[in-house]
Image (cartoon, rainbow, N blue to C red):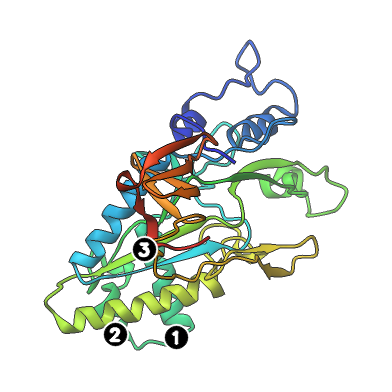
Amino acid sequence: MSATTGNAGLWYDKFCDRWKPDWTGFAGDSGKRDWIAQIANIDAGNSQKKVGYSALMTEAVKRLEDLVEAQAGRSFRRTTAWRFVTGLGRNHPVENGFAWRHDLGTPYIAGSSLKGLARAYARDWASLDDETLERTFGPRPEAGLAIGSVVFLDALPIEPVALDADVMTPHYGPWYRGENNAVPADWHSPTPIPFLTVAPGQTFVFAMLPRNRSNQRDQEDCKMVADLLNEALETLGAGAKTAVGYGQFVEEEAKEDEFGSRTPKKTASTPRAPDPENWSGLEAIVYSEVVRIIEDRGAQLLVRFPDGSEEQVERHEARLRNGGRRR
């Protein structure tokens, strides 16, 4: 799958074109579904594409990880085990919004959301005492604005993101709306509501910093919180609809089969020392884009770009990605 051009978030939020001529609603019952399918690039007969510009995303992730290293912070990468969604409560014509990183046009997870997830896990599952909670995360939210010893950064996808569509079908609309003393009964008509999601198998980088890098306790708190957040992402999940399996992040890429069982994908992601004699099969950075090296021809490399095009480049123009990691 190659990546689309342009800012998908801006397109999704501002340029919906499925209205009736008189602007009274969507054109046909399938209008919302068709719009989401168009954004997710899953229109019938078309090959699915990803959203996000690879060069900008690689640069953003590098800046993030460089900041973490400079400030003695912690970072790790985790992959969506199944679908993930955040920002459903945002206003949007299709009834369910979506959280976009405005500068990248990709999904992301706000640092404030990760802080709330980590705090809830630390309090309810790890049973941290009140003193440690307040020192690490700051006083309770009702106490007003406050800071703790750890700074949470936004989680970013490391490469263009595949999206997917799902549908929720509430059955008790009249009861929810309080119409004519309605009761939650099965004779009410179901109302299918489509919404946009992140597809399984998408990798994000999570990062946090000690408030004061020269303070040993802040550094220890940062390490502790990184471990807690990692456990929370796999145990509780992030974003919306976690009660039905959304939002789980795992160490290895994984997928759900049709019966809901999670099985790891077969990947070879163990780092190895780069072989100076043969770079074939490795990933590299060329012209600020992540490319796959198809063939090592000595001084020249045959590489494949994200859009599927292939080109010969000089070896000195390529920089191995992740120290020479096979994927």
Q: Which residue is drawn at the image coordinates 18% and 67% (left, top)?
A: 71
Q: Nearer the viewer, mark 1 or mark 3?
A: 3
Residue that mark 3 sits on: 323
Q: Which residue is drawn at the image coordinates 48% and 34% (left, top)?
A: 8
Amino acid under disc 2 = Thr
Residue that mark 1 sits on: 126
Q: Nearer the viewer, mark 3 or mark 2?
A: 3
Residue 158, position in %: x, y?
Answer: 43, 53
Q: Which residue is drawn at the image coordinates 52% and 55% (left, top)?
A: 281
210 relative position to 268: left or right:
left
Disc 2 on helix, strand or loop?
Answer: helix
Farthest-out residue, right: 187
Residue 222, position in %: x, y?
Answer: 28, 76
Q: Quick check: 222 above or below 178?
A: below
Q: Nearer the viewer, residue 122 or 299?
A: 299
321 relative position to 45: left or right:
left
- Labels 3 and 2: the sequence-earlier one: 2
User: How many residues crowd around disc 2 within 10 Å: few (fewer than 14), some, or many (20 or more)?
Assistant: some
Q: Quick check: 150 above or below 94?
A: below
User: How many residues crowd around disc 3 within 10 Å: few (fewer than 14), some, or many (20 or more)?
Assistant: some
Amino acid under disc 3 = Gly
Q: CA distance from mark 1 to mark 3?
A: 35 Å
Q: Are marks 3 and 2 in contact (CB under 8 Å)?
A: no
- Labels 1 and 3: the sequence-earlier one: 1
Residue that mark 2 sits on: 132
Farthest-out residue, front: 298
- Labels 1 and 2: the sequence-earlier one: 1
Disc 3 on helix, strand or loop?
Answer: helix
